[in-house]
Image (cartoon, helix red, strand yellow):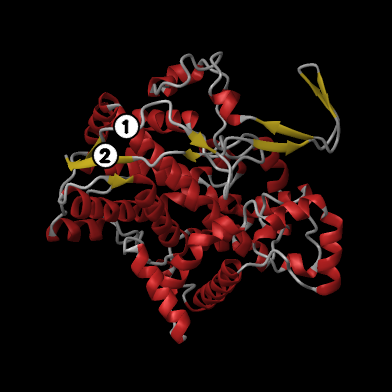
Amino acid sequence: MDNESPVTKCHLGRNNIFLMQPANWKRVRTVITPAFTTGKLKGLIPTFNACTNDLCSVIEREFVAKGRDVPLKDLCGRMALSQIAKAGFSLDVDVYGDIDSQQRREQMADRYEEKLSESELFVKNARTAFKDVMVTWKNILFGLCPVTISLFERLTAIDIFSTPPQLYFRDFLSRLYDQRKRQQETTQSIPSLTPIDLFQLLMDSVDEEEEGETVAAIAAEDADIVDSGWWGSVRQDRKKKVISKMELLSQSFVLLVAGFDTTGSAMHFLIYLLALHPEVQDRLREEIVEVAGPWEDGAGAFGLFLNFLKNFKTQIPTLSGDITYDHTARMHYLEAVIMETLRLYPIAPRTSRECTSPITVGGIAFTEGQMVGVPIYAIHHDERYYPQPEEFHPERFLPEARAARDPLTYLPFGVGPRNCIGKRFAEFEIRVAMAVLFRRLKFEKVEGTPELPLRCISHGETNFLRPADTLCVRAERV
């Protein structure tokens, strides 16, 4: 893609690292990688707790108390949006209101030129932003005539890929960036006033000094997301590498559009699988309670006060009953359940890579510029690696079983230097959410709902894997 034209440089969706050529990709990834490492993302775990507890309260009030079935896709999608808004940009949004009422409010605002609140605008545009950057007639046209489209944009200065949601988020993120810059100038001596969200981590990663993280420190804790050889070679001159404001905003935007649908879908599948396998659900809950203790409805005023004192120096607001990073690190069965879910239903069922130099692998010669497709779903369902591949067996991913299997047979986040940079963010998000959910609630299948293997589709608006049928469960308090 032409990343040098004035039109492209101002477009959010076309400046993200997934579309960049090697030189620009390496420069941008080098700068932003520290923001996505374990040490930085730990600070977002309290937010993940709060968002999941909100979902639990909605389920208890609207579905458990009223004896209604829980629509997984809808509720998991709403929670994922709330997590992205809060953990990504410190924005509180009302995601659990009635969708029809929200849309009527938006229509009335448009008709009478009333101004929606920032949170209402965020939700309105987030609902359609993901669809707008995926497969559309514009993307297909560009794929068929890239030179013609690039020339047209250069001559006319018209961005044919521009959409209302992208224009909104470009304005929203630009205003947020300028606001944070002003805050930095006035609160440099008061670190506790700095927002705790991924947007701020990205801004900090651009500004931080070279000694912020050593190669050894990052590679040791995040070896699965940082290639130590590549990172070591580029980290030495990291201070010389810069990214533009638009490039930083673009990475924030891709976090929103990529994290919203994918995380919600993963949790959607996981809850349903555990409803179908109560013995696995019971074993998981036993581990959660053993590690983190049973759920207590409210910590009490005195408990909250003690917790505030304990966290006063870090200014990370947590409740004494929260799931912590240390808890999730000890929940090995939870990790196995999540990994088996993503093996059965990898949200991105396929990916591709471009060969940058001639090479022969396994007797097959690849030439420079050749595109190589990676059939992730097919690999995950290959009986040579996973006997009875359509069955749900989390034991496949307990430590001993994992160690005996080629790691390249498990690719939900890709592999190598161009693996998914948001992998650790997604893992923390899902681990905390599942630990909170299954500590508070029990899920059961609804009579007449599909059994395994589920019928899935991966075409249409997103090309991501999703069930062909509506999946619902029953919930009850533990």
* Viewer-nearest residue: 224 or 433: 433
Q: Is residue 161 left or right of residue 64?
A: right
**Disc 1 target residue:** 274
Q: Residue at x 57, y 63 (%)?
A: 203
Q: Residue at x 35, y 28 (%)?
A: 333
Q: Is residue 158 above or below residue 34?
A: below
In the picture, which quadrant includes the N terminus?
bottom right
**Dot 1 alpha-carbon crowd within 10 angstroms: few under 14, some 14 to 19, many 20 or more:** many
Q: How many marks?
A: 2
Q: Is residue 269 above or below residue 128?
A: above
Provide the secondary structure element on which disc 2 rests: helix
Query: Which x, y percent locates residue 78?
Result: 38, 55
Provide the secondary structure element on which disc 1 rests: helix
Q: Is residue 410 left or right of residue 271?
A: right
Which mark identifies residue 438?
2
At label 2, the amino acid type is Phe
Q: Is residue 112 left or right of residue 171?
A: left
* Viewer-nearest residue: 411 or 314: 411
* Viewer-nearest residue: 436 or 217: 436
Res 269 seen here: yes
Q: Nearer the viewer, mark 2 or mark 1?
A: 1
Distance of mark 2 from mark 1, alpha carbons? 10 Å
Query: Which x, y percent locates residue 357?
Result: 84, 34
Res 38 seen here: no
In the picture, which quadrant includes the C terminus?
top left
Callouts 2 and 1 close, C-beta under 8 Å: yes
Whichever of callouts 2 and 1 sits on the residue coming sooner in the sequence is: 1
Query: Which x, y percent locates residue 348?
Result: 56, 39
At label 1, the amino acid type is Leu
